[in-house]
Amino acid sequence: MATFNLTVNGQARAVDVDADTPLLYVLRDNLELKGPRFGCGLAQCGACTVHVNGEAVRSCVLPVSEVKGAVTTLEGLGSSAKPSKIQQAFIDEQAAQCGYCINGMIMTSAALLEKNKSPSEADIRNALADNLCRCGTHKRIVAAVKRAAAA
């Protein structure tokens, strides 16, 4: 085991874990953050998406030893009392059905909106193409991203 110093949601955090421990496990098990979810464990579904230096990454396959920069999770975007504009747009559009994919959808959308303040529907669909949703709320998710972009 080794000590890793991370900045997560603006706070300095130290964790004692093996170097190859996936960031997802550190966030959920050590830091008790429940936004990022375990989905497939193969970086194929997007449920575990977080931002590292503003880039959307799959935390289930990123070893904690390779984290270089600030980590932001769903909890770091906003709170239930004061949601971010993308979180509020997902609420307003009722974009979640089962809610399992929503972490990845929101985190990927937030990264998109940081780079492209006015994405087209094609841009949104392309950005979200690798995030899997079994419930089929895609229309509402796209509508939520459009709403957040307009806000």
Image (tube, rainbow, N blue to C red):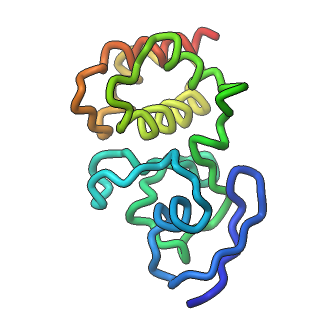
Question: Residue 148, located in which quarter of the rendered image?
Answer: top right
Q: Residue at x 52, y 11 (%)?
A: 92
Q: Is residue 70 left or right of residue 97?
A: right
> Image height check: is 48 above or below 132?
below
Q: Quadrant for the C terminus, please.
A: top right
Q: Is residue 5 left or right of residue 101?
A: right
> Image height check: is 3 above or below 92?
below
> Image height check: is 19 above or below 150?
below
Image location (x, y in percent) of residue 84: 66, 26
Q: Nearer the viewer, residue 108 or 126?
A: 108
> Image height check: is 42 above or below 48?
below
Q: Residue at x 57, y 23 (%)?
A: 86
Q: Quadrant for the N terminus, please.
A: bottom right
Extreme residue toward the bottom, this view: 1
Question: Residue 69, located in which quarter of the rendered image?
Answer: bottom right
Image location (x, y in percent) of residue 19: 51, 83
Image location (x, y in percent) of residue 10: 76, 52
Q: Residue at x 27, y 37 (%)?
A: 132
Q: Nearer the viewer, residue 65 or 89?
A: 89
Image location (x, y in percent) of residue 138: 30, 20
Q: Is residue 87 left or right of residue 97?
A: right
Q: Is residue 78 left or right of residue 116?
A: right
User: Total number of numbered labels?
Assistant: 0
